[in-house]
């Protein structure tokens, strides 16, 4: 009776153990799934199951899908003997399926056999755990900075207490077993303030949670960097992008018949928004969609950007880079600020961005454009007239407006499967920047508003997200985006045929292998894109900025 009570108690405790209770407080990255079987069921309903397995080259086998939670994490590990810091990993999967556990163990044994090492059975908290020794060598040329990854030399595997466990550190297994046995942990990822703030922003209603704690990542990076360059690079990166403490994403699949997926994203900046992140305006009222947003628009967004802060941002970036600051005297800095101010002082905060396209999707039918509010058209036109020709842009007159165009693809060694022309024009209260035909179409709509008025409006998903008082919002058609991506990949593959033909002249066998590998990869990618095209309908999103970060919501509609 005592044994039965102990077994039942352990089972209940095991079910309550979460990955954020097992991972240490200084965790770098994490991911968790509430129930694998529910996730797989949704993928099957969305006709994504086979495509995902084929893309990952996973044999579905005779085993059943585990029912229960799964979690994974990376964290720094200190080797006190060598005085180095490395990266450890721990993963847990709730599963009582003996066949699945056997398959995982066979994979572990196969790894040991291929590396000619022996598996050792050890005891951790009264459980059997398999361990294998290995030599890990990180490629020296993989990173531009010399890094010491410590002594990663042991892999552990176990199937115990209803969990399949895999990791690189003894402590991860020991902590999980202690939690199952009823011993509380004083510190863990769950007690980390950054993690708690990120999860609070994302909300509690989700099935999948992922995130990166950049504060912990930066600390680990600095300790592993043997060159000392990290101490110079990190302040520059922070001055450009802002001091970001962490990022997180949560997902819920099929919350209703109409909605197939909802995602929430969070960015935490506890010291305040700065850098590029500080340019995003907070609580800006939505404005009308401009009339040049036409029927061929595939994705559209509008955002509030504080362009008047760009000059101070450039000053901060320059000051944070000692080498750059030494090379520039005060007069050069003043000239640079004046040059940037000539542009920024003419802009408001309202911005619009759109991607356009029509079938069949080709380089000539896909376009993009950003339109930023211009509060002084005459001044900006004069500035463009003075500066753009010096950059190689050729001016042309179009409907009473001057367009400055540059071909970015002309300087590339290989042709690209899309139009890379780049044009700038001022008109209708905006500065228009984008592909040449997109800018021309916008100027036509501005010049002839009655003739150019279209039936384009909000899609079905836009009504599911708030966009009255936000920092930004938008909508799109993911099915068309996927098909557009497929067409571009096919065009790129056709251009690669020329390269294979050249290789074939001196090494036919190598050319055949490269072609076969590329065709296989393209077939898998196209299968996934086709599946996603059928799975996703209209989508919409919004983003809200506050003093300590961002929160964004994205919704994908069911196409049926």
Image: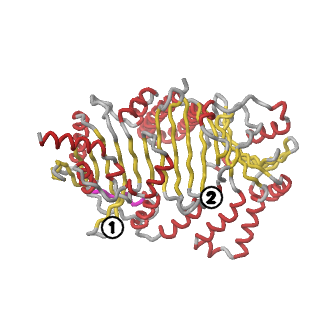
Query: Residue, x 69% and y 61% (percent of image)?
Result: 309
Q: Which residues are magenta?
A: 135-141
Q: Nearer the viewer, residue 284 or 378?
A: 284
Q: Quadrant of the C terminus?
A: top right
- Is 139 one of the magenta-colored residues? yes
Residue 445 placement (x, y as % from top left): 81, 36
What residue did someone put label 2 on? 278
Distance between mark 2 and mark 1 Cα atoms: 36 Å
Residue 536 placement (x, y as % from top left): 53, 30
Q: Work out whether mark 2 precedes mark 1 in sequence or the reverse, and give the earlier one.
A: 1
Q: Is residue 133 above or below residue 457?
A: below
Q: Is residue 55 above or below residue 31?
A: above
Decide if residue 460 is on the left or right side of residue 203: right
Residue 426 placement (x, y as % from top left): 81, 48
Q: Nearer the viewer, residue 190 or 5?
A: 5
Query: Extreme right residue here?
Result: 400
Q: Nearer the viewer, residue 379 or 407?
A: 379
Dominant SS in magenta: loop
Q: Is residue 297 above or below residue 193?
A: above
Query: Residue, x 26% and y 51% (percent of image)?
Result: 179
Decide if residue 543 is on the left or right side of residue 168: right
Q: Secondary structure at mark 2?
A: helix
- Is 367 one of the magenta-colored residues? no
What residue did someone put label 1 on? 84
Residue 255 placement (x, y as % from top left): 48, 32
Mark count? 2
Q: Quadrant of the N terminus?
A: top left
Q: Secondary structure at mark 1?
A: strand
The chosen color scheme is: secondary structure
Q: Is residue 315 visible?
A: yes
């Amino acid at each position: 009776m005592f044994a039965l009570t102990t077994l039942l108690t352990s089972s209940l405790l095991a079910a309550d153990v979460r990955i954020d209770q097992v991972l240490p407080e200084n965790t770098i990255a994490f991911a968790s799934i509430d129930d694998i079987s529910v996730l797989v069921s949704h993928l099957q309903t969305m006709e994504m199951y086979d495509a995902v397995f084929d893309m990952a080259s996973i044999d579905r086998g005779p085993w059943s899908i585990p029912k229960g939670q799964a979690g994974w994490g990376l964290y720094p590990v200190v080797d006190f003997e060598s005085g180095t810091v490395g990266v450890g990993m721990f993963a847990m999967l709730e599963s009582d399926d003996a066949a699945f556990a056997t398959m995982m163990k066979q994979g572990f044994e196969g790894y040991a056999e291929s590396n000619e090492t022996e598996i050792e059975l050890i005891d951790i908290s009264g459980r059997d755990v398999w361990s294998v020794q290995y030599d890990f060598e990180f490629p020296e040329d993989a990173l531009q900075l010399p890094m010491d990854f410590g002594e990663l030399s042991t892999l552990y595997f176990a199937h115990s207490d209803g969990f399949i466990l895999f990791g690189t550190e003894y402590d991860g297994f020991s902590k999980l077993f202690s939690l199952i046995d009823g011993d509380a942990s004083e510190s863990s990822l769950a007690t980390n303030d950054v993690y708690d703030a990120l999860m609070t922003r994302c909300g509690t209603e989700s099935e999948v949670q992922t995130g990166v704690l950049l504060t912990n990542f930066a600390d680990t990076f600095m300790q592993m960097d043997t060159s000392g360059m990290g101490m110079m690079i990190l302040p520059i990166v922070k001055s450009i992008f802002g001091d970001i403490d962490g990022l997180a994403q949560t997902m819920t699949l099929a919350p209703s018949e109409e909605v197939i997926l909802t995602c929430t994203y969070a960015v935490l900046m506890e010291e305040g928004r700065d850098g590029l992140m500080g340019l995003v305006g907070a609580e800006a009222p939505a404005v009308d969609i401009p009339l040049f947003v036409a029927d061929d628009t595939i994705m559209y967004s509008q955002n509030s950007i504080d362009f008047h802060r760009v000059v101070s941002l450039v000053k901060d970036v320059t000051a944070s880079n000692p080498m750059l600051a030494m090379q520039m005297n005060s007069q050069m800095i003043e000239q640079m600020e004046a040059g940037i101010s000539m542009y920024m002082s003419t802009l408001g905060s309202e911005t619009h961005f759109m991607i356009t396209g029509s079938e069949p999707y080709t380089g000539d039918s896909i376009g993009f454009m950003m339109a930023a509010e211009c509060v002084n058209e005459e001044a900006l036109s004069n500035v463009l007239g003075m500066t753009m020709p010096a950059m190689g842009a050729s001016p042309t007159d179009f409907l009473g407006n001057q367009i400055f165009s540059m071909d970015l693809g002309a300087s590339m060694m290989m042709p690209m499967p899309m139009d890379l022309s780049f044009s700038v024009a001022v008109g209708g209260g905006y500065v228009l920047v984008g592909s040449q035909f997109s800018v021309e179409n916008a100027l036509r709509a501005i010049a002839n508003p009655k003739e150019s008025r279209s039936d384009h409006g909000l899609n079905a998903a836009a009504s599911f997200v708030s966009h009255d008082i936000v920092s930004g919002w938008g909508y799109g058609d993911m099915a068309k985006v996927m098909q557009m991506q497929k067409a571009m990949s096919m065009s790129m593959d056709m251009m690669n045929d020329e390269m294979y033909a050249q290789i074939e002249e001196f090494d036919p066998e190598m050319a055949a292998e490269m072609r076969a590998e590329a065709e296989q990869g393209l077939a898998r990618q196209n299968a996934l894109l086709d599946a996603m095209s059928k799975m996703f309908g209209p989508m919409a999103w919004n983003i809200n900025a506050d003093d300590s970060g961002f929160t964004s919501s994205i919704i994908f509609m069911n196409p049926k």
